Every structure is written in C-alpha cells, then in structure tokens.
Amino acid sequence: MLLIECPYCGPRAESEFNCGGEGGIARPLNTEALSDEQWGDYLFMRKNPKGLHHEQWRHANGCGRWFNALRDTVSYRIHATWKIGAAMPVTQTGEPV
Ligand SMILES: [Zn+2]
C-alpha cells in the first residue's frame, strides 16, 4: 500500500487521495487582455514530464484540503508534499527534496 503524506493529517493510504493535475499554475490577473491562444494555453496546456512533476492533490476522503506534491512520474515516488501557499521544500543544495 502506498502512503501519501498529507501536510495536515500525516501519512494516509493512497486510496484517500485524488490527483488534481499540475500544480503551481497561477490564474492570469488581467484575463480580458489575453488572446484566445493565451487563454487556451492557461486552461488546457499542461506539462507531461518524465520524472519529477509538481502536482496538486486533494485529501478527498480525509480533511478535504488541497496541497502540493512533487511526484516522480516514472517511479510514482512522492518526494515531498507541502501546503498551498508555502514554498516547495528543497535540499541544502537548493534542489527539490
Ligand atoms: Zn489531510
């Protein structure tokens, strides 16, 4: 069983969580000034990397809160989780955990 560390509740079973896709995407402030292409890019274009990926997850069957996760798409290992609005945890060399 895979355990995921909820930043609010601690480690819980993967079955309690839902992945919400790529994380760290900020909504544009002045949406009226965007072209259709720019708006479409914001809405639909997402990264699909092989390796570390910044994602947003929700503890749907627990506290119900959203949080960030850094997951390896090859091994499925979750390297770090952190609260929305907090900085991504890094090692002492400045690389992601
Ligand atoms: Zn939780």
Image: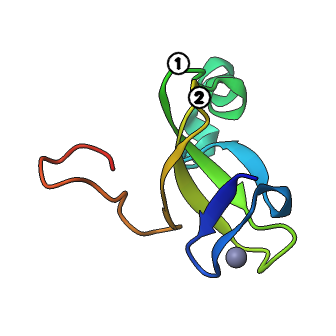
Q: Is residue 95 left or right of residue 45?
A: left
Q: Residue at x 67, y 59 (%)?
A: 3
In the displayed structure, 20 sits above or below 17; it is above
Colouring mode (rainbow / by chain / secondary structure / one colour): rainbow
Residue 5: image location, x then y, percent = 59, 66
Q: Give the numbered dot on residue 50.
A: 1
Towards the viewer: 69 or 46: 69
Towards the viewer: 36 or 7: 7
User: Seen from this angle, which residue lies furthest front?
Assistant: 1
- Cα–Cα gap, marks 2 and 1: 6 Å
Asked if the beta carbon under badge 2 is closer than 8 A to the nearest atom of ligand 1, the reply is no
In the displayed structure, 8 sits above or below 86; it is below
In the displayed structure, 13 sits above or below 7; it is above
SS at mark 2 in the image: loop
Count residues near mark 2 (Cα–Cα under 10 Å), then give few for <14, some for 14-19, many for 20+.
Answer: some
Q: Amino acid at mark 1?
A: Lys
Count residues near mark 1 (Cα–Cα under 10 Å), then give few for <14, some for 14-19, many for 20+.
Answer: few
Q: Amino acid at mark 2?
A: Thr
Determine if residue 21 is in view. Answer: yes
Q: Which residue is mark 2?
A: 73
Q: Residue at x 33, y 50 (%)?
A: 97
Towards the viewer: 26 or 54: 54
Q: Is residue 50 left or right of residue 43?
A: left
Residue 65: image location, x then y, percent = 71, 73
Asked if the beta carbon under badge 1 is closer than 8 A to the nearest atom of ligand 1, the reply is no
